[in-house]
Amino acid sequence: MMEYPGPISTLTCQPYEFSLTGELTEELTLWRILVDDKLFSSIVQPFSASNGDIECSACLICGYPGCGGGWVAARRVGPYVIWFRPFIQLDDLHGASPGMKAGEVLIFDAEQYAKMVGNGDSQTLPALSADELKLLILAELPEPGLALYCLPELVGDPRGFKLLQRAQQALWNQAETIMVVSEPEDWTEIHLGLDEFGVPECVWRIGKIEPYWAIMFLARPRLPVWLGGEAIAAIFASIVLADTC
């Protein structure tokens, strides 16, 4: 399996003592977390590399684990650990959600993750479920009407409108069929321009592992592994690149 060509994040955990000022007057150990050397949260409950749910906004009144909010989900995907905002918010009753939008993903090398956290084993993290995968992809997958262009151009679908339509339908109906696969020997990188501020692009690498298609999502959405299965095959079954026809 190839290394992910996109950015891999770093994680820095800085423990410190916080003095509670409510009815409970005592010292509470919290972590200041930096992701890629930028502050992610300064009031994180300590966690291990084995924890699938991370409380990034500790309660500063009682300090009791689980009473805060700002939850982040940590899951294994191939040789990586990813963080994302849970789709069923654990903190609905306890304040603000984390500083991550729905569908945003932070990617860490699994071996380095355990070292950066300093305790626990990332191999015992929960694996990303089919439902979580589906929601992560659909949260970042653009509406077909936003398609402006596709490079290289697709025969009969120069904007990539039909491609995005098929992707929405297949991922909604067949997400449970998606699986992590090995890297194809040959692949093509396609860019779908979007009618949004700055004209961002979907960047996808697609290739065949006979007889099926495989895809790696580099942007909109973003996931660090090659994926295959019936849903992916349905998206690309009729695709023809204009420069190969």
Image (spheres, rainbow, N blue to C red):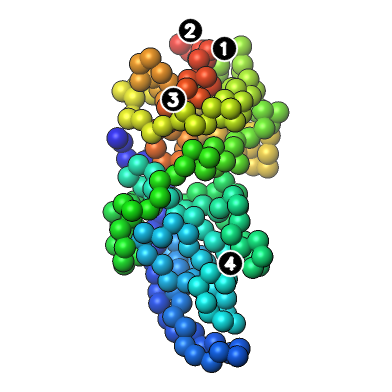
Across and down, in percent, residue 144 comes to 67, 28
Q: Earlier in the sequence, mark 4 or mark 3?
A: 4
- Residue positioned 57% across, 64% down in the render: 70
Q: Amino acid at mark 1?
A: Val
Q: Amino acid at mark 4?
A: Gly
- Residue positioned 44% across, 84% down in the render: 17
Crowdedness near tag 3: few (<14), some (14–19) or many (≥20) residues, C-alpha within 10 Å: some
Across and down, in percent, residue 118 comes to 31, 67
Give the distance between the C-alpha atoms of the residues marked 2 and 3, in whole angstroms. 25 Å
The residue that disc 1 covers is 155
Q: Earlier in the sequence, mark 1 or mark 3?
A: 1
- Residue positioned 32% across, 40% down in the render: 3
Mark number for residue 245? 2
Q: Earlier in the sequence, mark 1 or mark 4?
A: 4
The residue that disc 4 covers is 69
Compared across the picture, whether 213 is left or right of 88 comes to left
Tell me if label 2 and label 1 are in contact, CB under 8 Å.
yes
Question: Where is 77 relative to 161, above or below?
Answer: below
Mark number for residue 229? 3
Crowdedness near tag 4: few (<14), some (14–19) or many (≥20) residues, C-alpha within 10 Å: many
Q: Amino acid at mark 2?
A: Cys
Q: Earlier in the sequence, mark 2 or mark 1?
A: 1
Task: Give the secondary structure at mark 3.
Answer: loop
